[in-house]
Amino acid sequence: MTATGAKPIGARDEADAAQAVRQMFESIAPRYDLLNHVLSANVDRLWWRRAARRFREVLARPEAEILDICCGTGDLTMALLKLRPPGARPVLAGDFARAMLRRGAQKFGRQARQSPSKGKDAPYAIPIETDALHLPLRDASLDLIVTAFGFRNLANYAAGLAEFHRTLKPGGQLGILEFSEPGGFVGKAYAVYFRRVLPAIGRLICGKHGPYNYLPSSVGAFPPPEEMLAMLRQAGYVDCAWQPYTFGIAGLYAATRPPDTLETP
Ligand SMILES: C[S@@+](CC[C@H](N)C(=O)[O-])C[C@H]1O[C@@H](n2cnc3c(N)ncnc32)[C@H](O)[C@@H]1O
């Protein structure tokens, strides 16, 4: 059966699921960056940079309105900022876990970015504490929405895609970077690492076992690429594609809100 949204253990409904996810990220925020880099051997940095490069044309437009949703501690946001020109409109960086967002803002916020050494035109991001399913943004206001390793955690995937569609301008682009489960020999070897080794290291470093058991189980329950692409099309997107990264351990979904078509009389 197709997954409709994240279901942490014990969650009875979507509100419960969102609350459990938010609390989990609040609790691991102090160790999140360290764990990410250790558990991925820093490959995550390559993934964020590669995902950002996919949208380099829109990022290069100073007036473009860009949202990194589920930005967490801001590493994808930082990769986006590297491709923004000096003086560009600030990127919006949203997350509902305040402790994650606060850490992110220390990297991408105006104060951090526009220090005397970096200059007053250095691109920066504005942190927004928000739920991805209820964005405080006008209809058709964004040129680009990106999200890294956050979409899988939404309590309702269809509602997330609909909210992104609402806030994107016609012709606006969507990028979703997510884990996936590769097949073949690599898949088998990776499954051992992901399901056994990773939760053990996670437990050791952050002293909690819930979050790093949740990670492999949430990836296992997430729709495979062909289902995700079907969901994107069903939600009204066009030009939907999936680009696998590192043997398909992760991958980038790219899609576009269709441009308005002019009706000819
Ligand atoms: C695995 S972290 C990824 C953070 C960052 N994008 C990265 O690549 O490191 C997932 C983030 O999504 C956020 N998140 C999950 N569900 C959310 C929702 N419904 N609204 C806003 N943020 C959400 C969590 O708080 C967490 O910070």
Image: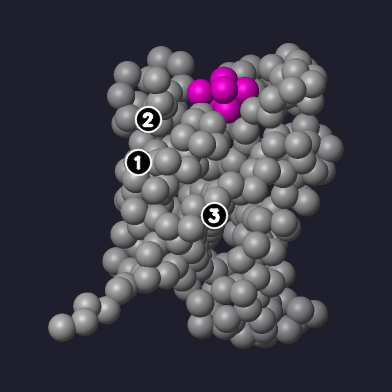
Q: Is residue 224 visible?
A: yes
State yes or no: discs 1 and 2 in contact (Cβ < 8 Å): yes
**In the rendered image, which residue does mark 2 sit on?**
4
State yes or no: discs 3 and 2 in contact (Cβ < 8 Å): no
| Amino acid at dot 3 | Ala
Q: Which numbered disc flags the more N-terminal residue, 3 or 1?
A: 1
**Magenta-tinted stretch:** 214-221
**In the rendered image, which residue does mark 1 sit on?**
158
Name the colour scheme. Answer: one colour
Most foreground residue, 170 or 262? 262
Q: Is residue 59 above or below residue 151?
A: below
Using residue 226 as the reference point, say whether residue 15 is left or right of it.
left
User: At numbered mark 2, what does the secondary structure look like: helix, strand or loop?
Assistant: loop
Most foreground residue, 96 or 157? 157
* Residue at mark 1 to residue at mark 2: CA–CA distance: 7 Å
Q: Position of residue 97 (x, y in %)?
A: 49, 43
Quadrant of the image for the N terminus? Answer: top left
Q: Position of residue 69 (x, y in %)?
A: 49, 53
